Image (cartoon, rainbow, N blue to C red):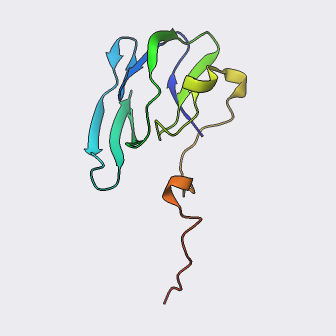
Amino acid sequence: MKRVVGLPGDRIHMSDLQLVINDKPVPLQITDRGESTGILRATEQLGEHSHEIQIDLSLGMREIDDELVVPADSYFVMGDFRNNSEDSRYFGFVHKDRLIGRVTRLAVSVADERQWLKAPLQKLD
């Protein structure tokens, strides 16, 4: 599951944590610097919608050095776990025919980083 961050015709650039679309930095508010967990958390505002992103401080960040222009009928997508996501920075633009639907809710994530699948089962009283 990926978030659409670039629409057809948008110009995209990214350096460090800052995503820039059409020469405008996307507002980013750091909510947890990750000093105790190693996971930086922030809220990013794309248009009218805000969403949480996170960055594993032990991993590098793939940047977008040169400005990219999203082609017609295509989109630029990114994962919310920014430096632990294979997204348009790796596989390129996504043609509109490849989009499946819109996510409205995420009940639970079983990402390896959270180790929920490896956690021992505990009996509930």
Residue at 47% x, 27% y is 62
What is the residue that sits farthest to the bottom in this orientation? 125
Residue at 56% x, 54% y is 112
Left or right, residue 5 beside residue 117? left
**Looking at this view, is 65 or 105 the one in front?**
65
**Looking at this view, is 115 or 100 the one in front?**
115
Decide: is 79 above or below 37: above
Residue 30, picture quadrant: top left
What is the residue that sits farthest to the right in this orientation? 97
**Looking at this view, is 119 or 110 the one in front?**
119
Left or right, residue 124 beside residue 91? left
Decide: is 85 above or below 73: below
Residue 21 image point, x, y percent: 41, 17
Residue 84 image point, x, y percent: 51, 40
Residue 48 image point, x, y percent: 38, 31
Left or right, residue 83 beside residue 74? left
Residue 77 image point, x, y percent: 55, 28
Quadrant of the drawing holding the N terminus: top right
**Looking at this view, is 3 or 33 the one in front?**
33
